[in-house]
Amino acid sequence: MFLTITTTGTPERPATDLGFLLHKHPEKAQAFSTSYGTAHVFYPEASAERCTAALLLEVDPVALVRRRHGGKGRGGAPDAALAQYVNDRPYAASSLLAVGMSRVFASALKGQCAARPELVERPLPLRVEVPSLPARGGADLVRALFEPLGWTVGAAPVALDERFPEWGESRYVTLTLTGGHTVADALRHLYVLLPVLDDAKHYWVAPDEVDKLLRSGEGWLATHPEQKLITSRYLSRRWGLTRDALERLELLRLAEADDTDVEEIDNAVDETEDTEERPVPLAELRRGAITAALTAAGAHRVLDLGCGQGQLVQALLKDARFTEVVGVDVSVRALTVAARRLRLERMGERQAARVKLLQGSLAYTDKRLKGYDAAVLSEVIEHLDLPRLPALEYAVFGAARPGTVLVTTPNVEYNVRWESLPAGHARHGDHRFEWTRAEFRAWADAVAGRYGYTVSYAAVGTDDPEVGPPTQMAVFTVAAQPPTDSAPKEEQAA
Ligand code: SAH
């Protein structure tokens, strides 16, 4: 099986730089033994204008069979005796080629290049050719996998037998990819997607495969439209591992979309939740609790203050009871992600009339926020510096003054229950503070008193007998006109 990578050069940037990136000298032919045979690396051409590196894997079918029957083999269905020796493995690019790549190009895959570190980040004009690629799913799937990554894809089906065109096409394609990528990214794409297209992994998939997949998928898999298919096939359709990988990818995607605003722990599962079914992530529990509280309050027009990436806005829009939902956030990036999530641009007129996304800071009064039934501050207050909090209190409770205000925030006492959280750490790098139940109540009682609201409290997630629930919620209901001197000093001075 065979794979070539070609790049072209310019006077300032010779094509032979490829040799540095692959850690393989263009003038040498090298051989590496792998557990399946021998991997050869050589350069059919190496000039300043054009340089091609070739990886040829000579598979030893007998070693393959022996290994398969060894401790790590897949076992299970006994292969037909002949198929053990006569199969496509020596010729077709597949998971074996990926294993060969990881052995031969280990540093390149990691994006390491001690000799010329400045080269690593630079995208090069690349052309990858794989003459014989088994592609379950055909040329269409090949395109669906590589095109979203920015490759121009050629995937020509290979005839079963050129002498007999009536026999039709084989499941092999000749693959050519062209595009501007760093060498490390190109290798990572191939390392994951070749075995995905082959869809017949030759070794038992161990849990550390999830880590390998996420490492190689870094920067591209979390946003790939075929993420599910890739993950499930890569992990040989083992559902437990696939789900684990997909959950971790979702966290990565959110983190990549806006790494300062994502509540990582939110998607952590409340382990203490005593259910047989898939445990519900805390963020989902919180949206459920908020929706229930809004419904109980009879709210129809709702503000989501500090809406982040719009998950709650999206959930509320699914409920016809909420006739207007306004998401407000200070982060343009978060709002951009929210708009994409909601498909604002493709929304029908009637649906679009129900939703608005506004950029603004909650530390300033804002006329646009007056007159709503309810406002939600879900996991927002802890993102403000404590001295700014009175300004938010005034802007929300004093100026916007909705009938109901829901505030959720982490209960710091619960942090000892998060297995992944080192002792003494906040749940998110951007949290300026996290409160105990007593601290939260002291704050909320004071705010309610100052602005003429009554307040009650609710638990979100399992209410642990010792440390309380992971998320605490205060429900404020407007009771009276606020005292006239309620504006904070800072705000009056401004
Ligand atoms: N409500 C969402 C997001 C919480 S993350 C949820 O429950 O998942 C906190 C959000 O508050 C971030 O999106 C951040 O941009 C926003 N935020 C922080 N300070 C803000 C401010 N002063 N004004 C408006 N939004 C703010």
Image (tube, rainbow, N blue to C red):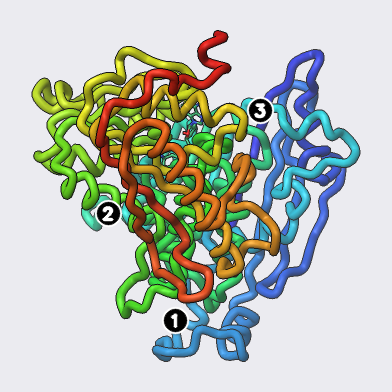
Residue name at image x 62 percent, y 29 percent: 387
Residue name at image x 22 percent, y 41 percent: 316
- Decide which of tag 3 and tag 1 comes sooner along the chain: 1
- Decide which of tag 1 and tag 2 comes sooner along the chain: 1
Identify the amino acid type marked 1.
Ala
* Residue pointed to by mark 1: 83
- Mark 2–mark 3 distance (CA, rounded to whole Å): 45 Å
Residue 25: give x, y in percent of width and height.
Answer: 85, 43
Q: In this view, does 426 lie above or below 361?
A: below
Residue 152: give x, y in percent of width and height.
Answer: 46, 30
Q: Residue 288 carries which label?
A: 2
Most extreme residue toward the right is: 115
> Disc 1 on helix, strand or loop?
helix
Residue 159 seen from this side: yes
- Left/right of residue 10 with respect to residue 257 in the rendered view: right
Residue 194: give x, y in percent of width and height.
Answer: 50, 54
- Decide which of tag 2 and tag 3 comes sooner along the chain: 3
Judging depth in this view, the residue of 222 and 368 nearest the camera is 368
- Mark 3–mark 1 distance (CA, rounded to whole Å): 42 Å
* Residue pointed to by mark 3: 123
Identify the amino acid type marked 3.
Pro
> Disc 2 on helix, strand or loop?
helix
Q: In which quarter of the image is the N terminus?
A: bottom right
Identify the amino acid type marked 2.
Gly
